Amino acid sequence: MVQITYRSSDGAQRVVDVPIGTSLMQGAMTHGISGIVGECGGSAMCATCHVYLDPADQARVPAPNAVELEMLDSVADERKPNSRLSCQLIASPEMEGLVLHLPSRQV
Ligand code: FES
């Protein structure tokens, strides 16, 4: 397990345990965190699991692949350099304490 913080755009936050090997989108779903939709179930086809990484955390997660980078063009809120699809972030020990900032909208 790793502890992940999901912080909504209004500042509210939840800290939850996500099993190693599970996507951070699935971790949000399991704990009923609103603000992540995950419409396609995690296959990088919907962009409704958009999150922003803390800039300081970007080196702690693997870089996005070409499919994720293309799908990030479809996010509903602003795409930023620290935008990621949480379904493509798979929990690993390096992610302990990661903070994900949720956009104000996913659709
Ligand atoms: S859940 Fe659809 S792109 Fe992540």
Image: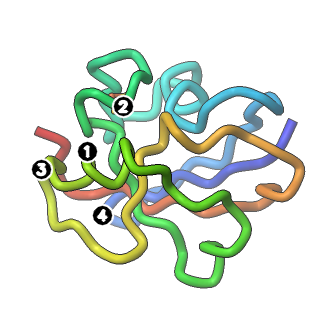
Q: Name the residue under label 1.
A: 71
Relative image position of residue 63 (x, y in whole percent): 58, 61
**Farthest front residue?**
66
Numbered label tally: 4
Q: Name the residue under label 3.
A: 76
The spot of residue 85 in percent (x, y) is: 41, 46
Mark-to-mark CA distance, 1 and 2? 7 Å
Q: Depth-wise, is mark 4 or mark 3 nearer the camera?
A: 3
Question: Which element is circle 4 on?
Answer: loop
- Identify the amino acid type marked 4: Asp
* Of callouts 4 and 3, the N-terminal one: 4
Q: Earlier in the sequence, mark 4 or mark 2?
A: 4
* Viewer-proximal residue among 12 and 20: 20
In the image, taking residue 95 as reference, residue 75 lies left or right, namely left
Q: What element carries label 3?
A: loop
What is the C-alpha distance between the residues marked 4 and 2?
26 Å
Q: Give yes or no for contact between labels 4 and 2 (Cβ–Cβ under 8 Å).
A: no
Question: Which residue is the site of mark 2?
Answer: 44
- Vertical position of residue 39 compared to residue 12: above or below: above
Q: Are marks 1 and 2 in contact (CB under 8 Å)?
A: yes
Front: mark 4 or 2? 2
